[in-house]
Image: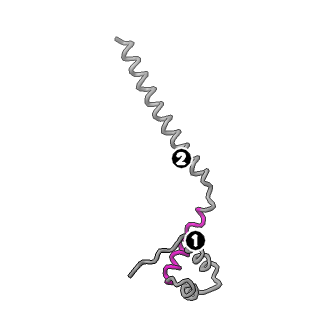
Amino acid sequence: MIRKKFSSEFKARVALEAIRGQKTLPEISAQYKVHSTQIARWKQKVINELPGIFSNSREKETKNQEQQTNELYQQIGKLQVENDFLKKAVYQR
């Protein structure tokens, strides 16, 4: 049996029709010739990922930048301590 491959646009169209609820899953399944279980999976995936569409990607970028900045400051602090230690060791000789 050959597996069917559906485009993302097709999946979105079918899932949106299932979400609208104007037709039953068997009706949508017959119309698009896709198994109702598959339509239910696409519908659930759309519903689960919908909040992520409206999330602010800048918030994620800001958090990543803050984390990187904190790590760099920690490294700088560590290097300054090591540098001070080495200076003291050299001057004591």
Q: Locate residue 55: give its quadrant.
A: bottom right
Q: Residue at x 52, y 84 (%)?
A: 33
- Residue at (52%, 43%) from the top-left corner? 67
On the rendered structure, is 37 left or right of 53? left
Residue 78 vs residue 23, the one in the foreground: 23
User: Circle 1 — which element?
Assistant: helix
Which amino acid, by three-letter code, is at mark 1?
Glu
| Image quarter of the N terminus | bottom left
Residue identified by numbered label 1: 9
Residue nearest the viewer, comparing 15 with 74: 15
Q: Quadrant of residue 93?
A: top left
Is residue 63 one of those drawn in magenta?
no
Residue 78 percent location from the top left of the image? 44, 31
- Residue type at mark 2 is Asn
**Residue lying at 56% horizontally and 66% vertically, measured from the top left:** 49
- Disc tally is 2
Name the spot of residue 37 as percent of width and height, x first: 49, 82
Closer to the eye: label 2 or 1: 1
The residue to which callout 2 is attached is 64
Q: Determine whether 72 is above or below 87 in the image.
A: below
In this view, the residue in front, 22 or 83, is 22
Residue at the left extreme, as displayed: 93
Q: x, y percentage for residue 69?
A: 53, 39
Front residue of 72 and 88? 72
- Distance between the alpha carbons at the discs numbered 2 and 1: 32 Å
User: Residue, x 58% and y 72% (percent of image)?
Assistant: 12
Read off the magenta span: 35-52
Query: Could you say whether the residue bearing mark 2 is in a helix, strand or loop?
Result: helix
In the rendered view, does 92 fall on the left or right side of 51? left
Q: In the rendering, which numbered label is found on residue 81?
A: none
Magenta span includes 36? yes
Of all residues shown, which one is farthest toward the front?
2
